[in-house]
Image (cartoon, rainbow, N blue to C red):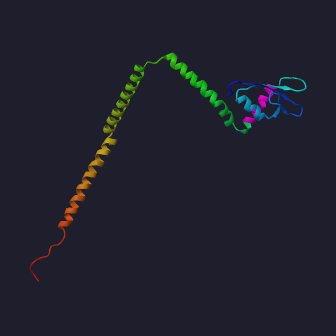
Amino acid sequence: MTANPERHLIKKYANRKLYDTRTSRYITLEGIAELVRDGHDIRVVDRDSGADLTQVVLSQIVLTEEKRGPQRLVDAGADALHERGQTLLDYVRKTLNVPGDIVGEVERRRGNIESMVDEAIERTLRRLRIPSRADVDAINKRLDRLSAQLKKANGQVSKRAVPRRRRGAR
């Protein structure tokens, strides 16, 4: 957005050309759209009759942008919507003036509710005889310990399993 928006008088000729009197140059619909996006005030008049054609030209620009795809219109308006939304949010925050204690209390209660839900799920799983995640983790740890003991025991057994030479019969 320009710091000091300028007023542009644009004259439309019979051959449909548009002439910006401020810059002394011909301008396209896209150029006018850029001026509007940059915050400039524009006025389009018919060169011969002096009739105000601003709304007609702006409508043409909207139709042209629409043909190119709705995304361009969304992009053009997104910043304005974001700024207005942020302003509204700031206003609501100031109006409500929510103290920090309330925010802390809400967070604490949310944590309590999450704990209650977790406990209720655990009880339900136990009643249905479905193992919980904690049960599965405990079983996995136990299996890991048993597996390690078996490996250790197999290593000792295989050392003992080496056949010894017998004395005696030759």
- Of residues 168 and 12, the one nearer the viewer is 12
In this image, 57 relative to 169: left or right? Answer: right
Which corner quadrant of the image does residue 121 belong to?
top left
Q: Residue at x 30, y 48 (%)?
A: 140
Q: Nearer the viewer, residue 58 or 63?
A: 58
Q: In the rendered view, does 5 fall on the left or right side of 21?
A: left
Up/down of 16 relative to 9, above or below: below
Residue 9 drawn in magenta:
no
Spot the residue most to the left: 168
Horizontally, is 130 left or right of 1 in the view? left
Q: Quadrant of the N terminus?
A: top right
Q: Quadrant of the C terminus?
A: bottom left
Quadrant of the rendered image containing residue 125: top left
Taking the spot 58% from the left edge, 22% from the top edge, the residue there is 87
From which residue to which does the magenta span run?
A: 53-65
Residue 149 x %, y %: 23, 55
Q: Position of residue 48 (x, y in %)?
A: 90, 26
What's the residue at 25%, 55% (across, down)? 148
Q: Is residue 64 magenta?
A: yes
